[in-house]
Image (cartoon, rainbow, N blue to C red):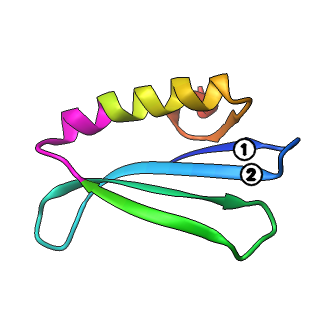
Amino acid sequence: MHRWENPAERRYYQATVQQNLFGDWELVRIWGGIGSARGRLTATPLCAASEGQGALAQIATRRAHRGYALVCGMEAIE
């Protein structure tokens, strides 16, 4: 799981690549307000797990341009 937060806007964004109950790969994205019960979740089907890694890289770039900082994920741990 990767999680980005924008403390100035009090917003968060999470993304992960996972298999569903049928064994198919999907990109799951969750976003909303920090401290709020409001938010959304969407799951996008993928052909393979490698496709999801490329999608995560695009999401990371977009989040950085919008002022979000990575707080949880492989890059944040290293």
Q: Residue at x 83, y 46 (%)?
A: 9
Between 17 and 13, which is closer to the camera in this rendering? 13
Q: Residue at x 74, y 61 (%)?
A: 33
The residues tagged by marks 1 and 2 sit, at their Cα atoms, a distance apart of: 6 Å
Question: For numbered disc 1, what is the local secondary structure?
Answer: strand
Q: Which mark is residue 19?
A: none
Asked if the stretch drawn in magenta spans residue 49, the answer is: yes
Quadrant of residue 50 in the image? top left
Which portion, as a residue range, is magenta? Answer: 45-53
Between 74 and 27, which is closer to the camera in this rendering? 27
Residue underneath mark 2 = 11
Disc 1 or disc 2, which is closer to the eye? Answer: 2
Residue 21 shown left or right of residue 28 in the figure: left
Q: Amino acid at mark 1?
A: Glu
Q: Amino acid at mark 2?
A: Arg
In primary-sequence order, the first of circles 1 and 2 is 1
Q: Residue at x 71, y 34 (%)?
A: 68
Residue underneath mark 1 = 5
> Which quadrant holds the C terminus?
top right
Question: For numbered disc 2, what is the local secondary structure?
Answer: strand
| Labels 1 & 2 near each other (Cβ < 8 A) | yes
